[in-house]
Image: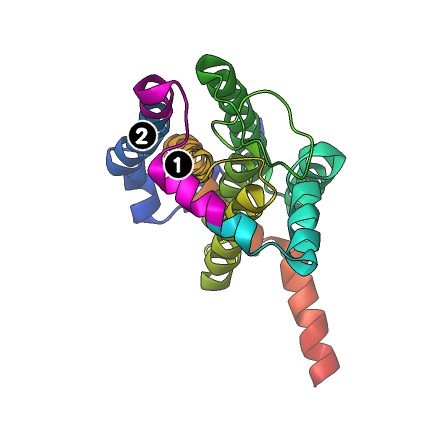
Amino acid sequence: MSSEKPPETAAAPAARRIARRWPLVSALVAVALAFGLGALIVYRDNGRPLRIDAAWMDEIIEHRAPVWEYLSLAMNFLGAGIAGVVVIPVLILAAFLLLRRKWAAGYFLTATIVSSGLVQVLKNLFGRARPEDMLVTSDFGSFPSGHVANAATMAVCLAILFPRVWVWLAGALYTAVMMVSRTYLGAHWLTDTIGGLLLGVGVAVLLWAPVAAKLDGERHLAAQHPSRGRIRRRNAGKDA
């Protein structure tokens, strides 16, 4: 029989209470809003852009410049294809496993897969046409933005697993830049990116709530692991 301590036993009391109510409710609301926004867009006027979509796209096209195009293309590369779908997630999973955080790895992997799957469901369900003035080639379905959903899911997952202010700020900035870049390239309407944001955040929180205690306890146990202690003692010896 394994003597390894269950991670939830090391969790803070607040983490044990999380699964009871508010995260599940808030996450369900976010996912429902994403579905509702898509339904509103598609069935209100056959998927035609809303007034805010058209106004935002006019501003974007008017202010296009090479420097912003290069940045947007870099975000396009990071958010999809081999880099976004394989390389970055695998590196993050490997880091969690090296840190002895298997629950974190499982949570991140599950959230990434579920988020990507729901994006494809909504794309096929609503079938919204993309803007005509596109600078990149994209697949079928404009709503919601898969790049933004992926960015939001990753940002929220990492912020939950590494609860630091700078992680939250970096994740928020990365997601915001991704949202702007998708509209800059003409790959999505503004409301497509909002739908992706709601979906990504909702999935990350929804899947976190039931395992919040395990994830929090695992984080504390990983910080107390003997190898961490040896490293700290070795560094202290060098400073002496």
Magenta segment main secondary structure = helix
* x then y, percent, for residue 220: 49, 51
**How far is the residue under mark 2 from the one under mark 1?**
7 Å
Q: Nearer the viewer, residue 185 or 77?
A: 185
Q: Nearer the viewer, residue 166 or 11?
A: 166
The residue where tag 2 is placed is 33
Quarter of the image that includes the N terminus: top right
> Is any part of residue 224 visible from this angle?
no
The residue where tag 1 is placed is 198
Q: Is residue 63 left or right of residue 32?
A: right
Find residue 185 and report its image quarter: top right
Look at the numbered discs 2 and 1 and tell me whether their residues touch, using CB distance below 8 Å: yes
Find residue 77 and report its image quarter: top right
* Residue 43 part of the magenta segment: yes
| Marker disc for residue 41 | none
Instruction: Describe the element under mark 2 as helix, strand or loop.
Output: helix
